[in-house]
Image (cartoon, rainbow, N blue to C red):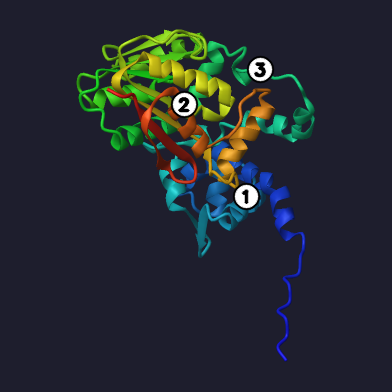
Amino acid sequence: MSQKPEKPRLDTTRLQKMAMAYWESAALMAAVELDLFTAIAHGHDTIPTLAQAIDISERNAERLATVLVAMTLLDRQDGRFSNAPDVQRFLVSDGERYAGPWILFTKPRWTAFGELSERLRRRTENTLGAYVDFSVDDARRYHAATYSIGMGAARLFSRSVDLTGRKLMLDLGGGSGAYSIVATEKYPGLKAIVLDLPPVTVVANEYIAANKAGDRVTTLPGDFTRTPFPSGVDVVVMASNLPQYEPDLIRLVVKKAFAALAPGGEMHLVGETLHDDRKGPLSAALWGLNEAVQASTGVAHTESEVKGYLQGAGFVDVAVHPFVPGVLSRVAGRKPA
């Protein structure tokens, strides 16, 4: 007589790990703030030399390094530490691809997420969330943190999409102008307009000037949910701000884009999207939850919902393309000729 397989014994291990996940975030952020990974890359790879390089006690250097090894951010062999490959590439501060500011990007929201239950009980929301009172200084801090990641995404976009022969791109919520700067450099004859909130366009102009792109990229201060779009554009891009807006606002913006596009023009929505069964990915779900923290009306959207926004506006050949797997999708459509 065969025995029934025993059911796995339930315990709290998984739940405890989730409850303590912010400890891991804190360890990573502390390592970035202390420039620990740079110190190791420069040969301060033992506890005594590391402690001296980042100005903490040897006891605390041992504590932090032990956690970072357990998190697989560091390796430890015979008392010497080395950075994991991704850490070496992105978290050494004198490296070309340094992304430390991006790692620290969400730290100002730490306290707010600690108050998540209270914030979920609030009933007051607005369409701009955290950007209602956004200042030029806020925009500078924001884009100092996101610029390197934005340029990486912009390069990926310009490799993924053939804009040969296109003349004018409208970059909605374009922030630093990264997508416009890269695209107009890669595709001769293409010019671009970055439409974003007035404080943001001040900062965008600084990045445009720093990249010597002023002859190719201009800015249009405004709110793309309200500001009229320029006519005659043949490419519209809206990148990395999908969860900031509710469905009706996305539909409105997509319809405005369709009206502004020349026949045969194309639109690309790049953003965090949920699978159609709404079971993930976690990153898209969390960005949607973040909008509750920001008191915004924004939500996470599924891939099919985003396709529907384009199809409902009249776009054809609408398709979902993987962009950054598990993080970002690109949903594109074409205005009929």
Q: Is residue 238 placed above or below 221 in the rendered structure?
A: below
Q: How many marks?
A: 3
Disc marking residue 252: none
Residue 245 in view of the camera: no
Callout 3: SS: loop
Location of residue 251 in the rendering, given as x and y in whole percent from the top left corner: 51, 22
Of 32 and 311, which appears nearest the observer? 311
Residue 66 in view of the camera: yes
Mark 3 or mark 2, earlier in chain: 3
Q: Residue at x 51, y 32 (%)?
A: 101
Q: Amino acid at mark 2?
A: Gly
Disc marking residue 312: 2
**Label 3, label 1: how many angstroms apart (C-alpha)?**
41 Å
Mark 1 or mark 2, earlier in chain: 1
Location of residue 20 in the rendering, given as x and y in whole percent from the top left corner: 71, 49
Callout 1: SS: helix
**Which dot, 3 or 2, sits closer to the camera?**
2
Q: Amino acid at mark 1?
A: Leu
Residues at marks 3 and 1 touching, judged by CB atoms closer than 8 Å: no
Location of residue 82 in the rendering, given as x and y in whole percent from the top left corner: 47, 54
Query: Which residue matches tag 1?
Result: 64
**Label 3, label 2: how many angstroms apart (C-alpha)?**
25 Å
Asked if residue 217 lies left or right of residue 64, the reply is left
Instruction: Kindly indicate the quadrant of the structure image that contains residue 294.
Output: top right
